[in-house]
Image (cartoon, helix red, strand yellow):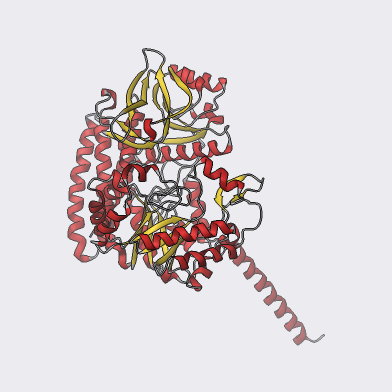
Amino acid sequence: MNRTRIGWILFAVWVGVTLILAFYRMACMPDPGREAAEELAQSRATSEPVLLGLIPGTAGTAATQEQTEPSLVAVVWDDRGESGESKLSRSRARNVSRLLGRAGVPVSVFPVSALEKALSGPCRVAHLVLLHSLANSDLELLTEFSTTGGQLIVHGSRSVPLMRFFGLRPLQDDYTAARRGQVWEGYPLAGISEELSGIPDRLYNPAPMVLELEPASEAVRTLTRWEDSKGEKGPGALFVAPRGYWLSRVLYDDDTLGTRECFLTVLTAARTPAVWEECADALRARAWHRLGAKDIREAEQRMLRLAPENRRAAVRDGFQALRKQEEAWHQAKRGNHMRKAATLARKLLRDAERVYATAVFSGRQGLPTFAVWARADLAVQTPGGWPSIAEGLAKAGVTDLMLRAGSPARADTPLPSVTRSSALRRHGDPFPDAIRACHAHGIRVHAWFPVLEFHDATPLRRKLYEKAGRLLTDGNGKTMAWLNPAHPDNVKELTELVRYLAAKTDVDGINFDFLRYPEQPIQGEKNPEVLTALLRSLTAAANGKRVSAAVYGSYPRCIERVGQDWQVWLDEGLLQQALPMNYAADVPTLRWIMKQQTRNRGRLISGIGLISNEALMDAVGLIDQLLEVGRQGYGGAALYYCDASFFEEYLPVLER
């Protein structure tokens, strides 16, 4: 073998080794999206969100999960009940922890199976959320916690032993409905207790039925009672006892974020003043963290660098006001007025968010479409009704309102052969007033229609559909509250409902939701062609109205996961726009989701989870995500969702 041949062989070996090493490095190269997701997951194990965001050092609003170490306040959920009840308990506990976290309260979340750890160490207040299956050992732990000064706040428990422990007794075995078929609207709170001064005047929390309780001893008092829409009093809603407070029903997301946050924070701090001090310090620090800085001086320098020349004077004026507020905060702290300091810190944070918006945000960022989803009862909880709502949406630059029309199970606007929702029965059809008010401001209104959702069906109707084979069944053969998209009777009924919405209302479009299979295993195949065929029928029934759909963001994984091949829907022209639900707690995670959506971006309206399971977003997080959507070339953004909180929390930073 000559030297030339040996040289070529050695060269070939070297090239081969080099290529192997290169491919190995590529395979092991970190994925920035994955790293962001991992960093987000790590941040969820802390009480303070990770510093992520558009600007280096700004914080994303991470979703709260179970914590590994106790803190001043524990939120406990029931992991021992049936799967549905445990899931609801965990979801509501997570909601409580997120609301308290917004207020700066240091919170940890534990299942009841870890109750001993939850109540240990620094814990002085425990929220027990939908705990129905308590053991004797749990009651012993709660007794020890209470005797050492710990306070309990119980949310909607059906546990009779826990009621007795608290000093309450049930008046019946199950829930009671309001008289004459009405719904309990909520309950008044103004002036109910000196201990709870500063609490909201009223809580809006519609309940078709509640558990009726009464004090079993003189040490327990009924602070307020449920009221119906006419102001008629009902069962006790909030009780006070030496051990703490008892809510007869868990809070849902009906009232504003600010009202629910204030209500829970005041309850939590009523007998534990240390909560106010923690809030005061955390909120003041968060104000500068959200601007990517450690203090006000660094925050001002950063915002002035980011702001265009024509906005720097406004930014300087904003910081001049912020300095006065921070000095007032210091004075309250020096005077040991911790609740006042917490209130000042909350305002400081809100105003810092507005300065951030002044520096970096130019109203809607040139996005052609800016949409919001909203429930049908939005006007019920918003002062001024639809005229005020439409005016506020216009100020924010909103172009499209997706207003819930109900579902095949429960109608929020009159739909033929569909049971009317309690909101529709109590307050009437919202669509005529909403359309009139929105059109006056050039805002399009779409009927938001969850196509296959059947969760709210009456027991009789569900039984009839189940008997007719019109519902899907899960992997164990159990009937699901989900219409079978392949059943011809369902296709016919859904088509007629869409035809009615298009012909009998003045909506500009139809926005389909739940046009998918459930995520969990089902009996049979999740056939994307079945959903596409159904959409063809629905689009034809829309009779020329704009058609869009909320879809899963992970494409093409969503085809196998839920049967949604929404790129085909766009390619066939079955949709004018698709709204991928890109709900994320921070910008890096949003960017990672968007990387999976490579086609038709001009026809994609990126969903942003303003108030969602993935995030409870603050104003800075909203601005950062809107900026990112615009930078990625999308046709617009859609916020999930708009409630009364939108106008107090987000409108001040959006309007220009």
The quadrant of the image that shows the N terminus is bottom right
- Residue 446 position in % (x across, y down): 37, 60
User: Which residue is nearer to you in this view: 72 or 174?
Assistant: 174
Decide if residue 476 is on the left or right side of residue 508: right
Direction front: furthest residue: 417
> In the rendered image of this protein, does residue 389 appear above or below residue 84?
below
Q: Residue at x 59, y 63 (%)?
A: 530
- Residue 590 position in % (x across, y down): 45, 58
> In the rendered image of this protein, does residue 159 appear above or below residue 612?
above
User: Which residue is nearer to you in this view: 545 or 352?
Assistant: 545
Residue 213 image-quadrant placement? top left
Q: Is residue 320 visible?
A: yes
Residue 528 image-quadrant placement? bottom right
User: Which residue is nearer to you in this view: 136 or 247?
Assistant: 247
Q: Residue at x 63, y 69 (%)?
A: 23
Q: Is residue 596 visible?
A: no
Residue 155 image-quadrant placement? top left
- Residue 158 position in % (x across, y down): 49, 27
- Residue 409 position in % (x across, y down): 48, 48
Q: Residue at x 47, y 72 (%)?
A: 573
Direction top: furthest residue: 218
The quadrant of the image that shows the C terminus is bottom left
